[in-house]
Amino acid sequence: MPELLRPIEIIRPKTIMLGSGTVAAVAPWVRSHGFTRPLVISDVFFADRIDMLGLPGRVAAFSAVKREPEIADLEAGLAAAAAARPDVIVGFGGGSAMDLAKLVAALHGTGQTIHDVAGVELVHGRSIALIQVATTSGTGSEASNRALITDPVTHNKLVANSNHLQADLAVVDPDLTLTVPPRVTAATGVDALAHCVEAYTNRLAHPYIDMYAVEGIRLIGRHLPRAIADGDDREARAGLSLASLYGGFCLGPVNTTAGHALAYPLGTRRHVAHGASNALMFPHVLAFNAPAVPQQTATILAALGLAAPAEQRAVFEVAYGYCHGLGIEMRMSELGVAEGDLGPMADEAYAIRRLLDNNPREISRDEILAIYRAAF
């Protein structure tokens, strides 16, 4: 008799537009709902391309989103919303812009703060429509019901997880990623890979999510090197956009593990981009977990087109070689991390129980510190 499935809740955006040219669907969707006061929240890379959305009405923009945004950035976004009084918010960018758009849409006019909603299903509701338009292939934020913001006082990520953060319309147009530079393509691609891998090797892994996770890994293995080598390779860009979306599907019901827990302090302390942080940690955590999930590890490496070695150390070498071969910086010291940061970072990572408790293998604070030292 087959094993009974663990119950999970599958929440998706109400509508997903996927494919080349689908960004053109945003304006008709806004018009069809009668919205006339759009607020676009974008990162700086797309600040001068908001007109391509063709939005009707009185369009306002908040384009000061930086990588690894902090509470002050959220407050600035909320101030922009107070001035614009929007009836629809459009997140237009990578994960930082889309996460900020979620939080602004959920908090505007409600009286709640980020500290009120950090946790699971603490958002009271949302009265503003939300559109997410992804311009990178990494975070999958357009398809998830989570949003993260950094608290600069504690150096921790505040995470809101609520179905009210799910988009009404998610647009995944690979044409928007054609201008992403090779180094960013590599880092965001490994971020999407980490979402899939950490869901697949998770203590809460689920067969329904496994199919997205393994297919996402396969798509990245096939298309990421091609997109890095030739940014105009439209087939490769489409494959990565789909993989990133699948990684977003993995985040809600299952979530991530030690890889993300160890990556977060690099961003909160030293403002290392999220994708680069995850890429740096990826081979270390994959190898650490390999003894606990040997079959899954072999499947992951095979899906990437890599040989599956028998020894843990060899797993690290194969995964490290893969990331390094993509042109990713794999040393903390080259990313602005100081040796004196390692101990506090280990303390901070070890405290992220919501992720470490998902890890397939117990990991101590000293083992985290050892990984940091090996990556330094």
Image: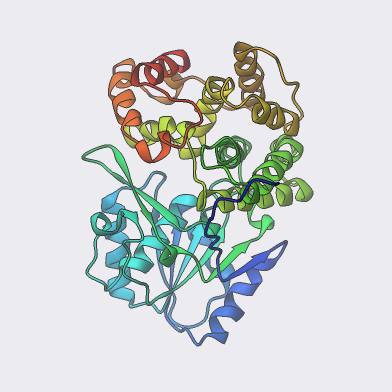
Q: Is residue 31 left or right of residue 374?
A: right
The residue furthest front is 1
- Please give the name of the residue rendered at 72% of the width and 52% of the height, measured from the top-left corner: 238
Q: Is residue 343 above or below residue 261?
A: above
| Chosen colour scheme | rainbow
- What percent of the width, then of the height, locates residue 151? 27, 44
Residue 31's quadrant in the figure? bottom right
Left/right placement of residue 59 relative to residue 222 reads: left
Q: Residue at x 54, y 28 (%)?
A: 282
Q: Nearer the viewer, residue 200 or 6?
A: 6
Labels in figure, total: 0
Determine if residue 264 is in view: yes
Relative to residue 198, is residue 118 drawn left or right?
A: left
Residue plotted at (41% across, 35% down): 357
Q: Is residue 178 visible?
A: no
Q: Position of residue 117 (x, y in %)?
A: 29, 58
Estimate the x, y position of residue 133 in percent, counting from the top left.
Answer: 55, 62
Relative to 370, is 220 on the left or the right?
Answer: right
**Is 112 or 63 nearer to us in this picture?**
112
Q: 368 and 103: which one is in front?
A: 368
Q: Is residue 317 above or below residue 75?
A: above
**Of residues 293 and 243, the one drawn nearer to the viewer in this rendering:** 293
The structure residue drawn at horizontal position 52% and vertical position 42%, both measured from the top left corner, is: 204
- Quadrant of the frame with the C terminus: top left
| Vertical order, 210 against 11 (above or below) | above
Q: Is residue 217 above or below residue 165?
A: above
Q: Horizontal and vertical percent for residue 223?
A: 74, 40
